[in-house]
């Protein structure tokens, strides 16, 4: 399977659709497909989208239409999980662990963390620069000082 950065939008979405189809059919999955399928399984609100492949592949999911882009959202989950597994940036695994304990689940912690990742990526896009890892880590650290339960 090619790396995500080598795929166009339709090809990338096809990986999600195929991974979900295989998961539901009980077929064997490559490690990346299994990771994708686990993220999809945790988001029942996206199941209908993935079970209508033509719409999933063609949909624009623009914020101005009021909908969240399920592929972006799930992709950010995958990014956070990869960062946590490699502890890069250094300390992210500790933050994830502490947030998971405070919020009651790793998934809830990821939801908080992906807000920081999304903000960092958006900022980099506006500036036309690579993401600022130190600003990202500062955003993550601030999550530890916020109170409240998972949203």
Image (spheres, helix red, strand yellow):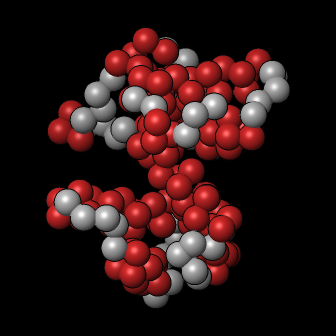
**Quadrant of res 108:** bottom right
Q: Is residue 27 above or below residue 91?
A: above
What number of labels is visible? Answer: 0
Query: Can see residue 139?
Result: no
Query: Relative to 133, does residue 21 appear above or below in the rendering?
Result: above
Residue 125, compared with residue 21, is above or below; it is: below
Is residue 85 visible in this depiction of the protein? yes
Furthest residue to the top? 54
Q: Whole-percent x and y of residue 126?
A: 17, 59
Find residue 42 and report its image quarter.
Answer: top right
Q: Residue at x 41, y 43 (%)?
A: 72
Q: In the image, 90: left or right of 112?
A: right
Quarter of the picture containing the N terminus is top right
Q: Position of residue 136 (x, y in %)?
A: 39, 74
Q: Looking at the image, which is closer to me, 108 or 126?
A: 126
For image coordinates 44% across by 46% down, the residue present is: 73
Looking at the image, is 35 positioned above or below residue 150? above
Residue at 65% from the left image edge and 68% from the top image edge: 86
Q: Give coordinates of residue 58: x percent, y percent.
A: 35, 18
Residue at the (47%, 52%) spot, across then down: 76
Q: Is residue 4 left or right of residue 124?
A: right
Q: Position of residue 68 (x, y in %)?
A: 34, 40
Q: Residue furthest bottom?
A: 145
| Left/right of residue 43 with respect to residue 130 in the rendered view | right
């Amino acid at each position: 399977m090619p790396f995500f950065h080598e795929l166009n939008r339709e090809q990338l979405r096809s990986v999600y659709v195929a991974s979900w189809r295989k998961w539901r059919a009980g077929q064997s999955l490559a490690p990346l497909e299994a990771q994708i399928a686990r993220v999809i399984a945790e988001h029942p609100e996206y199941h209908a989208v993935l079970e209508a492949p033509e719409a999933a592949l063609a949909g624009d999911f623009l914020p101005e239409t009021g909908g969240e882009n399920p592929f972006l959202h799930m992709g950010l989950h995958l990014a956070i999980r990869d960062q946590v597994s490699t502890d890069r940036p250094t300390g992210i695994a500790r933050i994830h662990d502490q947030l998971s304990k405070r919020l009651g689940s790793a998934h809830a912690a990821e939801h908080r963390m992906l807000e920081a990742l999304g903000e960092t990526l958006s900022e980099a896009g506006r500036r036309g620069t690579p993401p600022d890892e130190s600003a990202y880590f500062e955003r993550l650290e601030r999550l530890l000082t916020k109170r409240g339960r998972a949203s």
